[in-house]
């Protein structure tokens, strides 16, 4: 009888131990997605997000009209270079899905979203690019979507009515995520009037793989380009500011380590 009681207590201890272990894991998983809820809700629900996008494209239109006059004497076809994700296509439902599934970025889930071809236009993007194209400006889409996503990306953009949504104007990530080579390719045949993006490496190579301090310094040095040649769209959900800035380029961090890095980087008095 004594033996049975000891075994029972031992069994109970193991069960309780396993349960509390499970709770720790569940808590870690909650931490992992809870972090992005505010950013996703802001993009999806705030009228301020929409207003900032309209502001960016209103400014882009003014600068385009000016650039067309400024570069009139140059006998070269004119072009705009634009990023795709969070610049002309809104992928916040993908980030929403990550929250619902309590899951970090996975290539498989991202591919699933891209192949659904359900992304909507960022507010104002379609109108602006249509206007530019009607004024004879070619639109080149330089994006770090994978080349394997070419057909789905074009189908999504064509269905929304984006101009130049074809293989000749789409430069996706092949080998390098750096965009400088692809920008140079467009520049070889076209006069680039404007660049549009949500991530500063969409504009200049100086932002490639650089940390927070260096990104700030480069942004300060290029301050006159923002709102003139570079049109920046808001993206609170993800970007180099997080990967290269907050996590210092370390892609191997687990959820707990990321949380610790985030808390360490918060400035306070
Ligand atoms: Mg982007």
Image: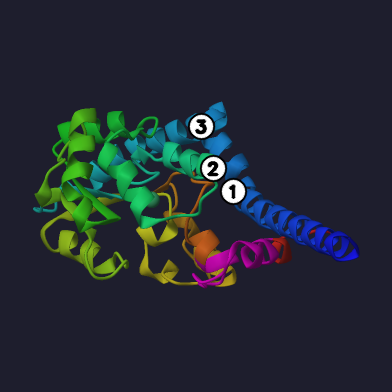
Where does the image place residue 134, in percent across and percent down from the top left?
16, 31
Quadrant containing the N terminus in the rendered view? bottom right
Residue 254 is a magenta residue: yes
Where does the image place residue 242, in percent across and percent down from the top left?
54, 60
Q: Residues within 10 Å of mark 3 (few under 14, many from 20)?
A: some
The mark nearer the N terminus, 1 or 2, is 1
Residue 126 is a magenta residue: no
Disc 2 target residue: 99
Identify the mark at residue 33; answer none if there is no mark: 1
Q: Is mark 1 in CB contact (under 8 Å) with mark 2?
A: yes
Disc 3 target residue: 44
The reply, left or right, for residue 128 in relation to residue 54 is: left
Residue at the spot 68% in from the left edge and 55% down from the top edge? 22
Looking at the rendered structure, the number of numbered marks drawn on it comes to 3
Can residue 230 be seen here? The reply is no
Query: Is 49 situated above or below 34?
Result: above
Task: Name the one closer to the observer, 207 or 28.
Answer: 28
Which residues are drawn in magenta?
244-262
Q: Is mark 1 within 8 Å of ligand 1?
A: no
Quadrant containing the C terminus in the rendered view? bottom right
SS state under label 1 = helix
The mark nearer the N terminus, 2 or 3, is 3
Residue at the spot 72% in from the left edge and 66% down from the top edge? 264
Query: Could you give the CA–CA distance between mark 1 and mark 2, rounded to whole angstroms?
Result: 5 Å
Farthest residue to the right: give it: 2
Query: Could you give the CA–CA distance between mark 1 and mark 3, rounded to whole angstroms?
Result: 16 Å
Where does the image place residue 106, in percent across and percent down from the top left?
41, 56
């Amino acid at each position: 009888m004594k033996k049975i009681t000891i075994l029972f207590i031992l069994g109970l201890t193991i069960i309780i131990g396993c349960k509390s272990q499970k709770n720790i894991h569940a808590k870690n998983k909650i931490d992992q997605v809870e972090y992005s809820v505010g950013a996703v809700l802001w993009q999806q629900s705030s009228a301020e997000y929409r207003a900032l996008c309209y502001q960016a494209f209103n400014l882009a239109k003014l600068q385009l009209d000016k650039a067309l006059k400024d570069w009139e004497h140059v006998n070269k076809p004119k072009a705009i270079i634009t990023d795709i994700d969070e610049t002309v296509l809104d992928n916040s439902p993908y980030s929403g899905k990550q929250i619902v599934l309590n899951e970090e970025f996975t290539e498989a889930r991202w591919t699933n979203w891209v192949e659904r071809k359900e992304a909507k236009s960022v507010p104002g993007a379609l109108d602006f690019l249509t206007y530019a194209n009607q004024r004879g400006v070619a639109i080149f889409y330089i994006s770090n979507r994978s080349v394997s996503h070419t057909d789905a990306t074009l189908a999504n953009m064509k269905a929304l009515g984006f101009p130049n949504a074809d293989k000749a104007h789409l430069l996706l990530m092949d080998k390098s995520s750096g965009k400088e080579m692809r920008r140079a390719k467009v520049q070889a045949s076209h006069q680039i009037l404007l660049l549009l993006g949500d991530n500063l490496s969409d504009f200049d190579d100086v932002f490639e793989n650089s940390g927070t301090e260096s990104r700030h310094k480069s942004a300060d040095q290029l301050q006159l380009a923002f709102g003139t040649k570079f049109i920046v769209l808001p993206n609170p959900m993800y970007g180099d500011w997080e990967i290269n800035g907050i996590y210092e380029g370390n892609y191997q961090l687990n959820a707990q380590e990321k949380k610790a890095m985030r808390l360490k980087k918060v400035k306070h008095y």
